[in-house]
Image (cartoon, helix red, strand yellow):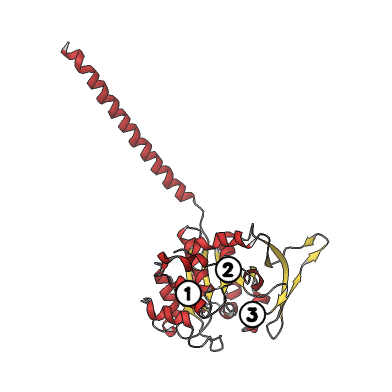
Amino acid sequence: MFEQRKQPKYFLILFLSIWLILLLLMSLQSNASSSSDQQQIPNIPDIIIDTDCGQYPDDVTAIAMINSFADQNKTRILAMMANDRYEGIVPVLDAITNYFNRSRIPIGITKDPNAFDSGKNLTWPDYVRENYPHPRFERNDQAENAITLYRRLLAASQDNNVIILSIGFFTNLAELLDTESDEYSPLNGRELIRKKVQKMIAMAGKYPEGKEWNIEKQPKAARKVIEKWPTKIIFAGAETGEHLLCGQNIIQNSRLKNSPVRKAWLISMEQNLTEACFDEIAALIAINGYEPFYRLIYGRMEIQPDGYNIWHESNDDNGNKPTRMAYIKQLTNDQDIINVIDPLLER
């Protein structure tokens, strides 16, 4: 009788043991499956941000968006390039990358004495440089030549995997086109770009025609890039952002009181600078693509000596024929776009 009373306990212990072993095996299988899935994720695109990060706050907001995309594993930030040579732009970029916990991202700057110089007293950049840590750079001349950095990074990159986000002048990119082979690559600039760069997204121009800052102030560099760039270029024109009011959420979000992005917007508002979203649109389509908010208008760009740009559509009997270049034209309402951009700023 005694042995018979003990049997149910033995069965219970045996059952629990088997159940625990099964749970352990399922967990191990799940972890192995997860690891296998990660190995099967295709390579994400690399991105280089070429910026004039200065007077207006849209550059720093676009940089915040790219950092959010990088946090989501949608891109890897290869470098930041300064195409404006005002003293302090490199420490400003250093402070921003440091805030986003990406202080190892290389920073290059144009060494062209004819590059645009936004001058002094640039409100929010001055504030960021004076109030946020920039551990690597105190001065512009401490940063690497942007062209050398471009060639070194492109040569080491996977073929057809780099996106260039141009949110400023085309100074660096025009000079890159003219480079010759060096210790990093036997290819000249145009050949290296063709091999490594998937596409360029540029906030530049006004469409179908008009004047816009990034082209107007450096028309020769812009014309060289338009004529010689060997891969796809998609333009976000001034008309795509001048009516959009993004960034209101970070202004009102006190949780972001330590954010240099929020501070840039607050200072810009005090200075009555534009609240429009220009560079943010380029950042959005660089990683998320242009659909469903925009469609592409293919053609070619003509840049006049004074920086006035004219778009010539590539139309034939079948409609707008795809070409190497296109600009985006909005399809949806403004709020649909803002609803995507604004959450990417809250970091």
> Counting residues from the N terminus, which is met first, the one under dot 1 or under dot 2?
2
Q: Residue furthest top?
A: 1
Judging depth in this view, the residue of 323 and 251 nearest the camera is 251
Q: Which image quadrant for residue 186?
A: bottom right
Compared across the picture, whether 199 is left or right of 297 comes to left
**Viewer-side label of 3, 2:** 2
Residue 53 lies, in percent from the top left, at: 51, 77
The amino acid pointed to by label 2 is Leu
Mark 1 closeness class: few <14, some 14–19, many ≥20 residues within 10 Å: some
What is the spatial separation of the Cα atoms under label 1 and label 3, in whole angstroms? 27 Å
Q: Is residue 34 above or below residue 228?
A: above
> Counting residues from the N terminus, which is met first, the one under dot 3 or under dot 2?
3
Which type of secondary structure does the marked residue at label 1 adopt? helix
- The reply to whether discs 1 and 3 touch (Cβ–Cβ < 8 Å) is no
At 52% from the left and 67% from the top, the residue drawn is 248
Residue 73 lies, in percent from the top left, at: 47, 58
What is the spatial separation of the Cα atoms under label 3 and label 2, in whole angstroms? 23 Å
> Counting residues from the N terminus, which is met first, the one under dot 1 or under dot 3?
3
Compared across the picture, whether 23 is left or right of 143 comes to left
Residue 339 lies, in percent from the top left, at: 56, 59
Which type of secondary structure does the marked residue at label 3 adopt? helix
Numbered disc total: 3
The amino acid pointed to by label 1 is Leu
Which type of secondary structure does the marked residue at label 2 adopt? loop
- Residue on which the image places disc 3: 215
What is the spatial separation of the Cα atoms under label 1 and label 2, in whole angstroms? 14 Å
Residue 26 lies, in percent from the top left, at: 38, 36
**Res 245 label:** 2
- Residue on which the image places disc 1: 266
Task: Work out which quarter of the rendered image holds the N terminus and state it.
Answer: top left
Task: Work out which quarter of the rendered image holds the C terminus and state it.
Answer: bottom left
